[in-house]
Image (cartoon, helix red, strand yellow):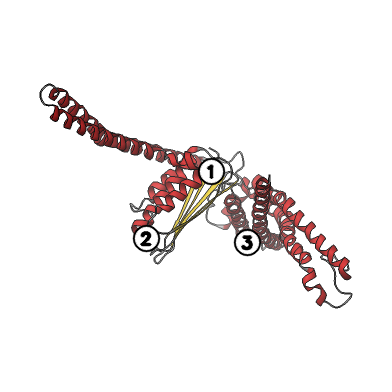
Amino acid sequence: MPGWKDGAVGRALRGSLEAYQRLAGGLGTASLALCTVGGLLVVAVLCLIGVGLPLLPGALSVVRTVAGWERERLSRWGDEVISPYPVWPNGWSARLRAAAADPATGRDLRWLFTHAIFGFVLGLIGVLLPLLAIRDLTFPLYGWMLPHGTATTSVGIPVDGWAGMVSSVLLGVGWTAILIGLTPAMARLQARPGLRLLEPHPGVDLSARVAELTATRAAALDAHTAELRRIERSLHDGTQNRLVGVTVLLGAARRALKKDLATADQAIEQAQSAAEQALAELRAVVRAILPPVLEQRGLGGALAALAAGCAVPCRVSVDVPGSRPASVDATAYFVVAEALTNISKHSHARHAAVDVRQTRDRLHLRVEDDGRGGADDRSGSGIVGIRRRVEAHDGRVTFSSPPGGPTILDVELPCVL
């Protein structure tokens, strides 16, 4: 029971920390939305006197940009929001007509005003809650230095003597309870307008998205075909040849049994050795299809085993509560294995790090090293194979390797297929 409590408390604290980060990020986009609303009002006033129309397409482009940042913020936390924008033509009048005909424009404006007000208020409350909690909890440490009669709690209640100190601490405990209990709901409430209004309108042509998914599925089929060919070559060139050798040796031993027992015993020993080698090669082929360590030790244990076998000292941090489809864990394992292989062979790094965490329905992986950098993801460095496998799951890959390092590989995989 104590372990269960510790686990529940830990999950609650992690959820509150994540919600606090989301609220803080939402406060940033809400501040930008508020400034954009102010700019739109200025442009609207200028339009009333006839000089603001040329500025309107630029103002709407700013709205697009801010909405795009909100989509990126929501996507980073597992709620992927697809950009619905078509390309606007050149010329301010043509751009204005295109913006007026675009259904996303009205939805962006509705989100902008909603987020500028409610998103800002929720984000501000979320950011202030831990500050208020810390202030009241630590008040006894510094309250005695304040002039008599001026000490108050965060809500303005006068603090006088030890009774007031105790009330301040209790108020801080209350703020902490609110912080842990309400911030996840506040973060979801703050994100709701973006999830509802910034996604593509049902009538929007998503042919580009369909084409992208078709391309990734085609790449997945190509990768699957290549994997089948690799397995076929491994079985044909290795295991099958070993088994043919076993058959030949057993036939020779059978013929030698009637003439020379020593020769027959030697042939049987060679056949046994060849059969053992064939079995080892067959086991290696099977393990390459789906590593058994994933089933035996889970994703965290499998990645720890990979890091232990890496030639470069590697730190592993895994936070993956719950379960995921086996194909997602296998892809994550392949990504880390390929990345650590590249680090061992090419990076000249002194340290590497693997960070894996799951947020709602997305698995985030980061593999980083302090090597010389300069890796090209378009060369035969294994990144192309990683990208194909990840995109087959409708995931995303971000690769950065400037000369001099560090090299960072970020991967996002949806956990719901």
Does residue 396 appear in this view? yes
* Label 3 vs 1, first from the N-terminus: 3
Number of residues whose C-alpha sits closer than 10 Å to that of mark 3, classed few (under 14), some (14–19) or many (20 or more): some
Q: Is residue 242 above or below residue 374?
A: above
List the residue tagged with mark 2: 347
Number of residues whose C-alpha sits closer than 10 Å to that of mark 1, classed few (under 14), some (14–19) or many (20 or more): many
> Mark 3 and mark 2 in contact (Cβ < 8 Å)?
no
Q: Position of residue 398 (x, y in %)?
A: 47, 54
Name the residue: 43% across, 62% down: 351
Name the residue: 78% across, 73% down: 142
List the residue tagged with mark 1: 414
Which image quadrant for residue 286?
A: top left
List the residue tagged with mark 3: 55
Judged left or right of residue 390, residue 199 is right
Q: Secondary structure at mark 2?
A: helix
> Mark 1 and mark 2 in contact (Cβ < 8 Å)?
no
Q: Is residue 234 above or below residue 408?
A: above
3D distance between C-alphas at marks 3 and 1: 40 Å
Judged left or right of residue 1, residue 163 is right
Judged left or right of residue 151, residue 262 is left
Q: Secondary structure at mark 1?
A: strand
* Label 2 vs 1, first from the N-terminus: 2
> Mark 1 and mark 3 in contact (Cβ < 8 Å)?
no
Q: Position of residue 413 (x, y in %)?
A: 51, 45
Nearer to me, 111 or 71 = 71
